[in-house]
Amino acid sequence: MSTETPSAPAFRYAAVTFDCADPADMARFYGELLGFPVLFSTDDFVLLGQEGAAGLGFNRLADYRPPTWPDPTQEKQAHIELGVDDLDLAEKRLLDLGATKPAFQPDPERWRVLLDPAGHPFCITTLV
């Protein structure tokens, strides 16, 4: 009787995908922000990233409803944390790219909450 066990399949993190109303607009925003080129694109889906590395995807959802953060009516499902060296400079760049800044900021000296063009909250911080 063999004591060998079959090897487990290898898994690699490939991407995280956000639902939205306009994948091209989201790809433009995050592509400029992170310097990621488009790897794949259709009318309903865009994948950004570098060949061989994890990326970001944007999927068209016909009935997309943006999160209402911080109001829990339409909860956020996930968000991205981005490390920056200068909060004020990074915030200005993101607002210029099309992000918006909600009035409620839990700890603006440590991190800032912004909303991408589809309304997904994301944070910038100097902590990482």
Image: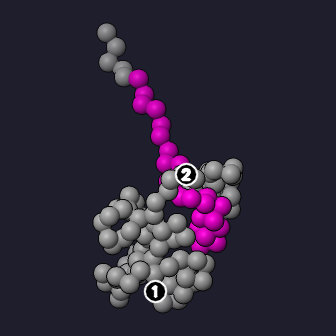
Q: Secondary structure at mark 1?
A: helix
Residue 17: x %, y % from top left: 51, 53
Residue 72: x %, y % from top left: 30, 66
Q: How far apart, in angstroms, are the residues tagged by discs 2 and 1? A: 34 Å
Residue 23: x %, y % from top left: 61, 58
Q: Quadrant of the N terminus?
A: top left
- Please say whether residue 82 is visible from this viewpoint: no
- Please say whether residue 76 is visible from this viewpoint: yes
Q: Picture quarter containing residue 75? A: bottom left
Instruction: Tell me which residue sits at (48%, 37%) in the image.
Output: 10
Please state which amino acid type lies under the numbered disc 1. Answer: Leu
Q: Is residue 57 above or below residue 33?
A: above
10 Å neighbourhood of mark 2: few (<14), some, or many (≥20)? few
Instruction: Tell me which residue sits at (34%, 14%) in the image.
Output: 2
> Can you identify the residue that label 2 sits on?
62
Q: Nearer the viewer, residue 96 or 7?
A: 96
Q: Nearer the viewer, residue 15 or 122?
A: 122
Mark found first going from the N terminus, 2 or 1: 2
Q: Which mark is residue 87?
A: 1
- The magenta stretch is 6-33
